[in-house]
């Protein structure tokens, strides 16, 4: 079975390398994730200690594509993406950065990528999405077909927040609507699309929507209306748009259940570490309990503490005399001497959470805009 999967992956790589490019959309301010994204691009926030954008790149590369364009905005967040991702050398791929000066829609992102795309087929992937199972199978199907486009759909509880597809009785696409107040179905577009060069004509043929954007749903609808073959694929595994804090935690939950578990750091004799825990190189677990699935990043120290299930601790973090579960803690942060258990939390970089020795007891807080603090 493993050999068969490896052969399928190799076949997908051969097929994709000869025919397709990758296009990742990595702009946007990430306002729904403030304050974490005031100082960081949302696509660089990690789940299970790996930035979401890196997971997208690896998913595309695993499908055999070795030429990827990344659409970025302007300013500090775009610079962060360039610095973090580089030229693709670490994956053995070529990365081209494409600037979208303003967030004018996904179809607009396709238009500004025209020089990079040329006449090649390509897969377009939103840089803040996480999906179960990768896209190798989808790439293979599209590569062997004569379809002009393939779109990925999934059943969802709140389709009004997404592009929505209505299918005919034969399973073909009848119409697409962007963020409808009254959705015609519960099938949402998940942010993974495959196109040939005709999508460039479609993007040039539509007009901005009421919100001033060139909608990819309108461009795909143009393809449908003009007789091009658009194949809908309904995904039945998990898929998460990591736009909100709860979504980030949910994505972290799923990915933690799929990672490889190993202990490369130090676990002392007084600690109890579950079998579903990754302890990375240089990390130390001292007189502590760690329940999985969980990950403890490089050079982090867990001392006299409890780490509960579905928790990601990034590198160079100190947790001492404290308890935390179902949370994400980013690098260079410390949590010390906290009596109440921390849970369901996203804790950013360089954060210090500790008990103050000052008397009388009081809460002393410095919180960024849009922070959310719960106190028992």
Image: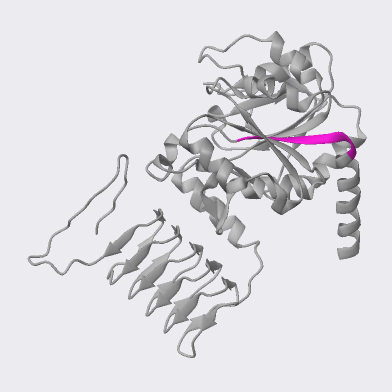
Quadrant containing the N terminus is bottom right
**In this orientation, does residue 241 appear?**
no
Residue 249 % position (x, y): 49, 52
Q: Quadrant of residue 143?
A: top right
- Residue sticking out furthest to the bottom: 269
147 drawn magenta? no
Residue at x 56%, y 59% (from the top left corner) = 48
Colouring scheme, one of rainbow, by chain, secondary structure, one colour: one colour
Residue at x 42%, y 84% (from the top left corner) = 287
Residue at x 63%, y 45% (from the top left corner) = 86
Q: Is residue 23 left or right of residue 346?
A: right
Q: Give the prevailing secondary structure in the magenta stretch.
A: strand
Residue 159 % position (x, y): 57, 31
Query: In this picture, which residue range is highlighted in magenta?
Result: 18-25
**In this orientation, does residue 260 appear?**
yes
Residue 170 % position (x, y): 83, 26
Residue 357 % position (x, y): 15, 69
Is 240 located above or below residue 49 in the figure?
above
Q: Is residue 192 left or right of residue 268?
A: right
Is 37 located above or below residue 311 in the figure?
above
Front in this rendered view, residue 60 or 91 = 91
Front in this rendered view, residue 115 or 137 = 115
Residue at x 49%, y 62% (from the top left corner) = 314
- Residue sticking out furthest to the left: 360
Front in this rendered view, residue 268 or 192 = 268
Q: Quadrant of residue 288?
A: bottom left
Question: How many numbered circles does the render carry?
Answer: 0
Quadrant containing the C terminus is bottom left
22 drawn magenta? yes
Q: Is residue 168 left or right of residue 162?
A: right
Q: Is residue 350 left or right of residue 275?
A: left
């Amino acid at each position: 079975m493993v050999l068969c999967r490896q052969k399928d992956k190799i076949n997908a790589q051969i097929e994709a390398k000869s025919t397709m490019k990758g296009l990742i959309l990595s702009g946007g301010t990430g306002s729904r994730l403030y304050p974490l994204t005031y100082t960081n691009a949302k696509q660089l926030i990690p789940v299970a200690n790996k930035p979401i954008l890196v997971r997208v790149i690896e998913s595309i590369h695993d499908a055999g594509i070795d030429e990827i364009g990344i659409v970025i905005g302007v300013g500090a967040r775009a610079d962060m993406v360039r610095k973090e991702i580089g030229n693709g050398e670490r994956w053995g791929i070529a990365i081209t950065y494409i600037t979208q000066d303003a967030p004018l829609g996904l179809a607009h992102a396709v238009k500004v990528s025209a020089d990079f795309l040329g006449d090649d087929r390509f897969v377009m992937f939103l840089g803040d999405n996480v999906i179960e199972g990768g896209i190798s199978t989808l790439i293979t199907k599209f590569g062997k077909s004569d379809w002009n486009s393939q779109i990925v759909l999934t059943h969802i509880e709140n389709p009004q927040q997404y592009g929505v597809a209505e299918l005919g009785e034969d399973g073909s696409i009848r119409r697409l609507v962007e963020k409808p107040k009254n959705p015609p179905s519960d099938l949402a577009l998940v942010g993974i699309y495959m196109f040939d060069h005709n999508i460039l004509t479609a993007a040039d043929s539509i007009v901005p929507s009421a919100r001033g954007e060139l909608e990819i749903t309108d461009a795909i609808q143009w393809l449908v209306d003009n007789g091009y073959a658009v194949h809908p694929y309904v995904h039945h595994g998990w898929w998460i748009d990591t736009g909100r804090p709860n979504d980030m935690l949910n994505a972290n939950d799923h990915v933690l259940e799929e990672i490889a578990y190993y202990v490369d750091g130090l676990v002392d004799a007084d600690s109890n570490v579950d079998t579903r825990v990754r302890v990375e190189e240089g990390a130390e677990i001292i007189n502590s309990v760690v329940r999985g699935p969980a990950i403890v990043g490089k050079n982090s120290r867990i001392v006299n503490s409890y780490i509960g299930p579905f928790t990601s601790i990034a590198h160079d973090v100190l947790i001492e005399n404290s308890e935390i579960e179902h949370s994400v803690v980013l690098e260079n942060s410390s949590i010390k001497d906290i009596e109440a258990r921390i849970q369901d939390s996203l804790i950013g970089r360089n954060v210090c959470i500790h008990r103050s020795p000052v008397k009388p007891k009081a809460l002393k807080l410095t919180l960024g805009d849009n922070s959310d603090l719960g106190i028992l």
